[in-house]
Amino acid sequence: DGNTSTEFEPDYLYNYPGIYDITLIVATITEPQCYDTLVFNHAVKVNESCRLIFPNAFIPSISGPSGGHYNINDKNNQIFYPLTEGVEKYRLEIYTRWGELIFVSEDINVGWDGYYKGKLAKQDVYVYKATGMCTSGREFSQTGDVTLYR
């Protein structure tokens, strides 16, 4: 993909699935300078990564609705949201056990804060449905349940 590194042992994260060649170019730092190139054809195969990992429980904040915006580094577990990889479009729906839709988000950065109509939802098991599209264009649909603890 055209990126370069001068590190001794470089690491690289490929952004898209595919098969990539690796080119190693070596040069001396003394005069006269000498160069050599080695190409490893089809050296790296990157598979599509499209994952959503949901927790099975959370404890909402009792201080009131937060709007669902979360900080991935905050370990308080007060917002229900998935860890994602390779997700381009996203829709999260939360249902009561009786099938009533109580929350919808189409923003990957907004999860459910455990509130419904401004009030803390009761401790119970809720059903989630996540649908969307991977960066590769493949569609996904995932369902499961989450326990809200108070």
Image: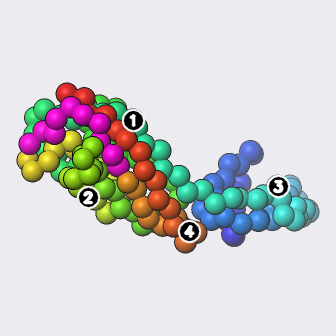
Residue at 44% in and 64% down: 132
Is the residue marked by circle 1 packed among few (<14), some (14-19), or many (20+) residues within 10 Å? few
Identify the element where label 1 is drawn.
loop
Is the residue marked by circle 2 packed among few (<14), some (14-19), or many (20+) residues within 10 Å? some
Q: Of label 3 and label 2, which has the lower sequence position?
A: 3
Is the residue marked by circle 3 packed among few (<14), some (14-19), or many (20+) residues within 10 Å? few
* Rendering coords of residue 68 (x, y %): 23, 49
Nearest to viewer (mark 1 / mark 3)? 1
Label of residue 104 in the image? 2
How far separated are the C-alphas under marks 2 and 4?
Answer: 22 Å
Residue carrying label 3: 29
Residue at 60% in and 56% down: 49
- Check if residue 127 falls in the magenta segment: yes
Q: Residue furthest top?
A: 150
Residue carrying label 4: 138
Q: In this view, does 137 lie above or below 52?
A: below
**Would you say the residues marked 2 and 1 are in contact, meaning their CB atoms lie under 8 Å apart?**
no
Residue at 74% in and 45% down: 9
Q: Is residue 42 above or below residue 124?
A: below
**Would you say the residues marked 1 and 4 are in contact, meaning their CB atoms lie under 8 Å apart?**
no
Residue carrying label 1: 56
How far separated are the C-alphas under marks 3 and 4?
Answer: 48 Å
Q: In this view, does 107 lie above or below 71?
A: below
Q: What residue type is labelled 1?
A: Asn
